[in-house]
Amino acid sequence: MDGQSATLQQLIVAVQRRWGVRALRWLGDARTTPAPVVIPSGFPDLDAALGIGGLPRERLTELLGTPTSGMTTIALTLLAQAQRAGDLAGYVDLSKTFDAEYAALLGVDLAALLLIRPSSAAEALEIMHALIGSGGLGVLIVDSLALLQMVPADALLLERALRVLSGALAASPCALIALTPLPYAPEMTRALAFRGSLLAHAAAIRLHVAREAWVAAEYGPPGCHVRISILKNQLAAIGGDVQLLIRFPNEVIP
């Protein structure tokens, strides 16, 4: 190996140590492309459609959906799954809509949940970076980073923060899940795909959750049929839509 090659190899090693193996690698070397570590979502059909078995650690995943679409239920189910597997979990409640009672019904251990309610965008982003950088969290849900895009000054902070967070995530076991509530009809959402948002560029996986039909209570626990469209998947081939049946619990899960 000549001097230039040795210098390049040293640079590659330094970058990988700081930002993770996926930040820089030789594409021809299979040893440098390990399978992504994931958290099962609690919905096997969704995990299969993603091609990797769940939602990835070390990456940002964005869930998009209108109110009552099932988006929050999916996120809280994943959070409960992670807790049962021994992960510590956090929830950044920017929208001030976290429903502790419903989270408990889905199996979330509230006593072991870190609930964050920051007073400003800057505070939220700094706390998120510190929590991810600590290496102590297995999953961090944020509802909703998209709110920050509505204020120009906050959007600039978010743009800068997303660049920094990618490096912190690469060295962390944390799965960052961003919930993006949509005020638009599902048809418009599918057409636009929200490619222009900051999160669209930063996310490794983007899932659009749309409720298709309610399930009446006389046929068992109440619930709904939802369709999840995989808008983006950097970690596997993009599959088609996946349909799920979500049941809403009516008593606290032990």
Image (spheres, grey):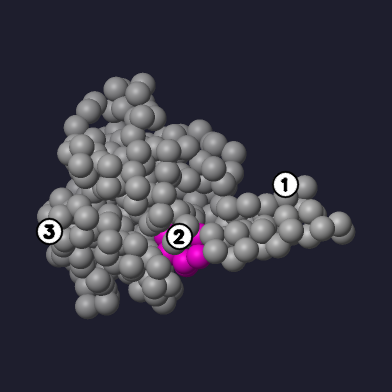
Q: Residue lying farthest right?
A: 1
Residue under the point 35% across and 73% down: 88
Above or below 137: residue 124: above
Secondary structure beneath dot 1 equals: loop
**What's the residue at 70%, 62% (across, down)?**
10
Amino acid of disc 2: Leu
Mark 2 touching mark 1, by CB under 8 A? no
* Residue 192 on image: x %, y %: 35, 23
Q: Earlier in the sequence, mark 2 or mark 1?
A: 1
Dot 3: element: loop
**Residue 109 occupies which quadrant of the picture?**
bottom left
Image-based side of 216 in relation to 35, left or right:
left
Mark 2 and mark 1: Cα distance apart in space: 21 Å
- Residue under label 1, please give it: 27
The residue sitting at 33% across, 67% down in the picture is 130
Residue in front for this viewpoint, 113 or 218: 113
- Kind of residue at disc 1: Leu
Magenta span covers which residues? 170-175
Work out whether residue 105 or residue 78 is closer to the camera in this orientation and state it: 78
Density class for disc 2 (Cα within 10 Å; few <14, some 14-19, many ≥20) is: many
Q: Nearer the viewer, residue 15 or 46?
A: 15
**Please, what is the three-letter code of the amino acid marked with disc 3?**
Ser
Q: Are marks 2 and 3 in contact (CB under 8 Å)?
A: no
The residue that mark 2 highlights is 169
Q: Quadrant of residue 104?
A: bottom left
Q: CA distance from mark 2 to mark 3?
A: 23 Å
Which residue is tagged 3? 119
Is most of the magenta stretch helix, strand or loop?
Answer: loop
Instruction: Identify which residue, 106 or 189, lies in the foreground.
Output: 189
Give the quarter of the figure containing the C terminus: bottom left
